[in-house]
Every structure is written in structure tokens, then in C-alpha cells.
Image: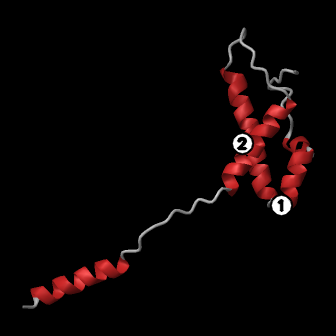
Amino acid sequence: MTKLSLRTLPAIDQLLLRPQLQEALARLPRSMVVKAARAGVEQARSVLRSQSGDQAVEMGPGWVEERVLQELAKMVEPSLRPVINATAISDFIETLMASRSSL
């Protein structure tokens, strides 16, 4: 496995030419894929900067691509949660309080 260094990290344009990311570009907006690619490269930079001289993190070219795909998965995951709309309840309480104060 080839070890990546800060100098050998792929450029965003190079990443976008990889087959799996080409598939993502066909399905998703380019801006989203580019944002994920930037995040993946930044993760690789962080890992490379955090290692000491004797430690070597085995990161092949596919490592960054995998991080990009993980970022895309997070981005497209639904973020809506069920909520309770209590507007009618609060209106009811306000009306009830107003009617009692007028007595």
C-alpha cells in the first residue's frame, strides 16, 4: 500500500474523476460532492499532521475516496425528526388564562 503524504494527497479535481465519485456526481449536486471531497482531503491532512515522524499511517489512494463517500452518506441521510406541534395547546392555555383573569 502506498503511503500518502501531504504532498501526495489528491487534488479535488483528481478525486472527482474516480469512478465511485463520478457515480455520485451523476446522482447528487456537484457542490455537495465537492464539499464532501474537501472534507475527505481535510480529514487526511489532519491524520497526516497528527502522526509523529516514526509513526506511519497506512493510507492508500482509496483511503481519501472512502472518507469522501462517508461524508456524502452523512450529507444525504435524512435529518428530520418527529416533533409534537403544541401550538393549539399553548393557544388553549392562553385563552383559558385570559378568560379566568377577566372573572
Quarter of the N terminus within the rendering: top right
98 lies above or below 23:
below
**Mark 1 or 2, closer to the camera:** 1
Q: Tell me the crowding category of disc 2: few under 14, some 14 to 19, or many 20 or more residues within 10 angstroms, Cα based.
A: some
Question: Which residue is tagged 2?
Answer: 39
Residue appearing at x 52%, y 62% in the figure: 81
The amino acid type, in three-letter code, at marker 2 is Ala
Alpha carbon distance from label 1 to label 2: 19 Å
Mark closest to the chain's N terminus, 1 or 2: 1
Q: Position of residue 22 (x, y in %)?
A: 90, 51
Dot label at residue 45: none
Question: Which residue is tagged 1?
Answer: 27
Quarter of the C terminus within the rendering: bottom left
Q: Are circles 1 and 2 on residues that touch, CB within 8 Å?
A: no
The amino acid type, in three-letter code, at marker 1 is Arg
The residue furthest top is 54
Name the side, left or right, on which 14 lies relative to 35: right
Q: Tell me the crowding category of disc 1: few under 14, some 14 to 19, or many 20 or more residues within 10 angstroms, Cα based.
A: few
